[in-house]
Each structure stands twice: as structure tokens, then as C-alpha cells.
Amino acid sequence: MMQVIKVIVVIFLLGGCKTPDIITVKLETAKENDGLLGSSQVGLNKESKDIDTYQKFAKQYKLDTFLVFSYSHSPEEYYYNQYLSGEISLDFFSKIINLYNIDTLKVRYTQYDAQSLILLGLKKNGDCVIVADENNNNDFYDDSFHTIENWFNENRKLSPDSLPYVTINNLISNYNNKKTIFSTSYYIKPLKRDSSMMLNHKPISEINISLISDEYLYGKFKLKGTKYRIAARNLNLKYVYDNKNTIIEIGKKKKFFQFYRTHDINKLNHIGDLVNLRKSAIEFSSISIDGREITLKVVPKIEGQNIIKDFAFKDFVKQDTSRFQEILNRYNYVIADFWGSWCVPCIRSFPELKELNTELASKGIGFVGFIYDQLKNKSKIDSLLNAYKIDWPQMLLEEAEKNTIREKHNVLSYPTYFLIDKAGKILYREIGIDGLKKIKQFMIKNRMI
């Protein structure tokens, strides 16, 4: 009898210790931002209907002029259904398609009604007034006023602490005929007319507002004796979590998340990506539509995830074809620049990029460009390359393509810079206008130059 009990105990222990193939993690809204997540920002559209409804409100509160803006938390579905029902014109819907890059062939959501209204007012003394419909009843009378004094008359920037922070309640999702009521919070930022300021890759041509969010969803799980944290957030302020706009990070229990600025190529992940952990790897299999549940698949550790494998390389400038490895073999290290003709910070960085190329040419450092753009913009790209006398290899990564180097290595911001060794290993990664300076500092610190 004792022997039978021992066998049962052994079987139980072996079965109980077996690593699960699938892990389901519940996510909830993080109580506070850890300071390293960055923010998501989106511009809003002027509400095209019922503007007369708010005239009485504006008069009562002595607003010299005002605009009402709307934001849908699932813009593809919301505006597509408005267009189909005839509530908005084809001309207006065309602008929405362009703004949100909507592919109407891929809109699969059922009826959805989750829209926020925000009023931006101007007083004669230059004060800026912002009122959000916080209880989502299409009425501003019962909502809080936020005033930024003399903002329209002064040329000053607003600190994050001075921006109104609001929570919109009673938003409704009817996804898959299941009614869900939710809320979301964000900062509201007024924008002045400024031809040098860009939003959604377009210059701001009139007074506008944008929404900024630092909210993300958070959860915990344990794998092979190690505790991990996991977080997910939307880049596009959308309630609907999808593969395109959802980014995910995973890390050990006591380490900060770093969604926005990271040097580790494995840190920014989407659904379908894999990431190595201590003793195994995790595949991000799926995430629920509201982001509250994420499914992980445990797989063996993978090698070479931080390596750019060799591929055929057609030079956009010279139109000749070679191998990427041939370019790597010519130099000690190569700096890769991901840019586009639509990207203002990328173009502003060209003089510094050219200067760095001249400075490092004798030190065995080469350069290569990856142009995330459309072939129809070829003349514009050629003009930029000629104007700045950029003569190193350039490869066009067309926006419509999938599984390119950009997709495989999660290039989400522009400009992005990689420092690559002869083996194709990505040694360092930086983004933004200061990226080149930090690449150079990294090389000096590690005695590469």
C-alpha cells in the first residue's frame, strides 16, 4: 500500500511541475505609470454635426469662439458605420481614411458606439477653455471647466502638469453583441497653428487639440520558478486591442517597463512575436478585444533573434543588387538609418547624419539607409538624397510590404538607428532626433571608434 502511495505521489509531483504549454494572464489597468512608458497621442476631428446644440452653452460661458471635437475609441468601425448609414459624406470619410489609414476591406467589428466629445473655447482675453463630456451624455453643462490662462496670446509651451487630465465614463462597446461599459483617461493638449508642427505625419493648419494617454494594462505570471510582469498598451488610444496597434512588454518582477525608448530589440513586441526568457521562450498568441486577457504559448528558447540575416539588397540609388552581408563585410560596423520622405525629424537629421558619415569613414564605419515609404514618392526621395548628397546604399521598404526587416525587427518610430556588426548582430538601437548622438556616445564608450 505504501509503495502505491509513493508511485501516486511521484506521478502527482511530475504532473504538477510540468511547464504549461499555454499561459493565460489577466490584465488590469495599471494604478500608476512607472515613468518610462512614454505616451500615445492622437489628433481629433471637428464634429461635423449638431454644432448648433452647443451655441447656447458657449454664449452662457462667454466664449468668443469655440470648436467641438470628437474621438472614437475604435475609429475604423465608428466612422465606417457612419459612412454606410449616410451620417457622414464620402468626402469627409475619405479624410478619415487618410488620417487613420483605414482599410475598409479589413473592418470586421460589429456595431460599436464609443465616442468622446471635447469642446475647445476661446475667450476675448485669450484664455483657452477645455470641457470634456466626462459622463458621455452629449451635454457639457454638467462637466468640469479647464482654463489655460492667456494661452492663445502667448508663445509658450505647456508642461504635462498644466494639461487637463480627464476620465471619460459610460463608453459602450457592443462587440460580438456583448454590451461592455468602460472608461478611459487622457490628457487634453491644445495645439496652435504652426506649419512646422506635425501630427499624424501632417502639418497642423489650424487650431486643434490632441489626446495623450499614458495608461496601460498590467499583469503577472510565473514560469519555471521566475516571476514576470507583463504589460500591453495601444499606440493609437483605441479601446479595441488589435495586432497592429498593440505593443507588449515582458520583464522580471522588479524591473521597469520601457515601452517608448529601449536599446534591446526584443523589448517591443506585438501579437505573434516571440521573446526569450530565462529558461524558455514565450509567444504572444492572442489578446482579447478589450485587452483584459492575453494568451502566452511556452516554446523552446530561440537563437538569432537579434540578428539581421543576409538578404538580397537592391540599392535604391544605383539600382544594382548585392547581398546585405557584402555591405557588412566592408566595414567594422554599420549604422542603419530607418527614415521616410514624410518624416520631418528624419530629414532634419540628415545634416548630422552626413557629418557623422564623413567623420567615421576613416574609422571603418559604414552607413546604410532603409526607406519606409511608397514607390510613388520616388522623385521626392531622389530629391532629398541629392540635396543632402547622401551616397551610401539605400533600400526601399514599401509600406504595403509585410515581413520586411522593419516588420521582423519592430521598427515603430522614425528615425530609428541600428548599430550592426559584421555578423549582422544589432549591438545598439536608438530612436529620435538625438539618436545619432547616442549611437556615437555608445561607440566611444565601448572603444569602437
Image (cartoon, helix red, strand yellow):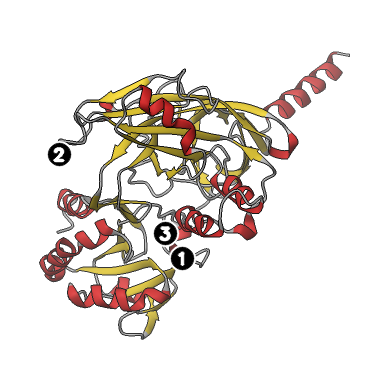
Query: Quarter of the image holding residue 415?
Result: bottom left
Quarter containing the C terminus: bottom left
Q: What is the distance, in whole Å, between disc 1 and disc 2 at their CAs?
A: 37 Å
327 left or right of 348 in image? right
Amino acid type for the residue under numbered disc 1: Glu
In the image, which disc is placed on residue 155?
Answer: 2
Q: Residue furthest top?
A: 2
Q: Which type of secondary structure does the marked residue at label 1 adopt? A: loop
In the image, which disc is placed on residue 149?
Answer: none
Front label number (2 vs 3)? 2
Q: Which type of secondary structure does the marked residue at label 3 adopt? A: loop
Amino acid type for the residue under numbered disc 3: Ile
Of the numbered discs 1 and 2, the one sitting upstream in the chain is 2
Task: Answer whether labels 2 and 3 touch (C-beta < 8 Å).
Answer: no
Q: Is residue 276 above or below residue 333?
A: above
209 left or right of 142 in image? left
Task: Answer whether labels 1 and 2 touch (C-beta < 8 Å).
Answer: no
Front residue (pair 100, 35): 100
Q: Which type of secondary structure does the marked residue at label 2 adopt? A: loop
Q: Position of residue 419 (x, y in %)?
A: 28, 58
Front label number (1 vs 2)? 2
Front residue (pair 85, 303): 85
Q: Position of residue 138 (x, y in %)?
A: 53, 28
Residue for point 33% across, 64% down: 340
Q: Which residue is mark 3?
A: 307
Q: Position of residue 21 (x, y in %)?
A: 68, 39
Of the numbered discs 2 and 3, the one sitting upstream in the chain is 2
Of the numbered discs 3 and 1, the one sitting upstream in the chain is 3
Front label number (3 vs 1)? 1
Q: Is residue 366 above or below residue 44?
A: below
Q: Which residue is mark 1?
A: 399
Q: What is the distance, in whole Å, between disc 2 and disc 3 at their CAs?
A: 47 Å
